[in-house]
Amino acid sequence: MELKQVIIAHKAADAQSKSWAQTCARQLEARNCKVLMGPSGIKDNPYPVFLSSVTEKIDLAIILGGDGTILTAARQLAPENIPILAVNVGGHLGFLTEPFELFQDIENVWARLLGDRYAVQQRMMLEACLFEGDKTNPIPSSEQFYCLNEMCVKPASIDRMPTAVLEMELDGEVVDQYQGDGLLVATPTGSTCYTASANGPIVHPGMDAIAVTPICPLSLASRPIIIPPRSVVDIWSLGDFELNTKLWTDGALATSIWPGQWVRVHMAECVAKFIILQKNYSFYQTLREKLQWAGTRIHYDNNHRG
């Protein structure tokens, strides 16, 4: 990998993350690398400025923070085909990040990147857009939205908790109508986040698949479903005349859904590319550690392994 132009984004209002970002910037600039650095947070989105100000290819994005910081970066950078080195600095769970301990030997990190001694893990993304008009001739009525974890259609109101009534079509066929708090359309990466909290399935990120999970449905017959990656999911909001129903991407508000509009979700053409420095990376170990599965707390010897 060349390191001629690099993005460094750090978690906003986190002193440790900012300090490490400054350290990275100094060391890269000493190697004649052009660095674009800035904070990323609820009120800070540095990526439009980064992407509009460059004249050459961006070789790498170093993202220092937690999962929320990484999700924001993936939505912005995956369509630009920019690989991401995500490091858990100032974060909490760190499900998508490299451990901070690996990053502390920073000279070794640069040597491994320049020497191509790393792996690249590709993660499936989803794309969503609002449509209106006749279903045989739909008219796009919003920009494209991307997510690494999940698209969520659910209502939001300041003074009450409205119930959603949502109809879902898969590839043009009505599958079900859901009453409850909303509907999640998730990638395998997102299956360990909000979808897992809603009792959805956990899907290995090496697969391409889409998980659709109702949130707190009023019917016990409403079940999660795994569908092929090339499926097209259309979601209609029924009976909402107060503009409560909204589309959320990775937990961030994307747009409101007006009466007569529907959301179309499908697999994105782009993928998120994550740099893996861990030599013995294991998705199952990540599940045991991050989700605190019972076997990590109560351990029994297995004498049958030999």
Image (cartoon, rainbow, N blue to C red):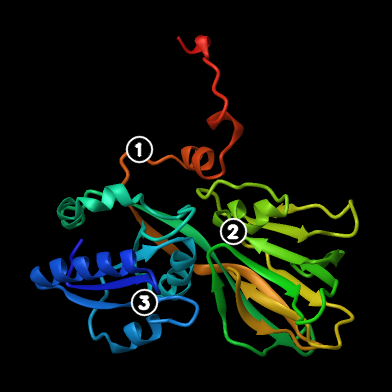
Q: Distance between the Cα atoms at labels 1 and 3?
A: 31 Å
What amino acid is at disc 3?
A: Pro
Q: Residue at x 20, y 66 (%)?
A: 23
Q: Is residue 113 above or below residue 139?
A: above
Whether residue 117 can be seen here: yes
Task: Provide the residue designation for mark 3.
Answer: 39
Residue 303, compared with residue 276, is above or below; it is: above
Residue at horizontal 21 percent and vertical 76 percent from the top: 35
Number of the label disc, if any, that sits on residue 187:
2
Taking the image as shown, residue 261 lies to the left or right of residue 108, namely right
At x 17%, y 50%, the residue is 108
**In which quadrant of the rendered view does residue 299 lie?**
top right
Of the two numbered discs 1 and 2 in the rendering, the one whose residue sits closer to the viewer? 1
The amino acid marked with disc number 1 is: Asn
Q: Nearer the viewer, mark 1 or mark 3?
A: 3
User: SS for tag 3?
Assistant: strand
Q: CA distance from mark 1 to mark 2?
A: 24 Å
Amino acid type indicated by mark 2: Thr
Percent x, y of residue 88:
38, 56
Residue 147 position, x and y percent, is 55, 69
Disc 1 marks which residue? 280
Helix, strand or loop under label 2: loop
Measured in 3D between alpha carbons, the distance from the residue under mark 2 to the one under mark 3, in whole angstroms, is: 27 Å
CB-based contact (under 8 Å), mark 1 and mark 3:
no
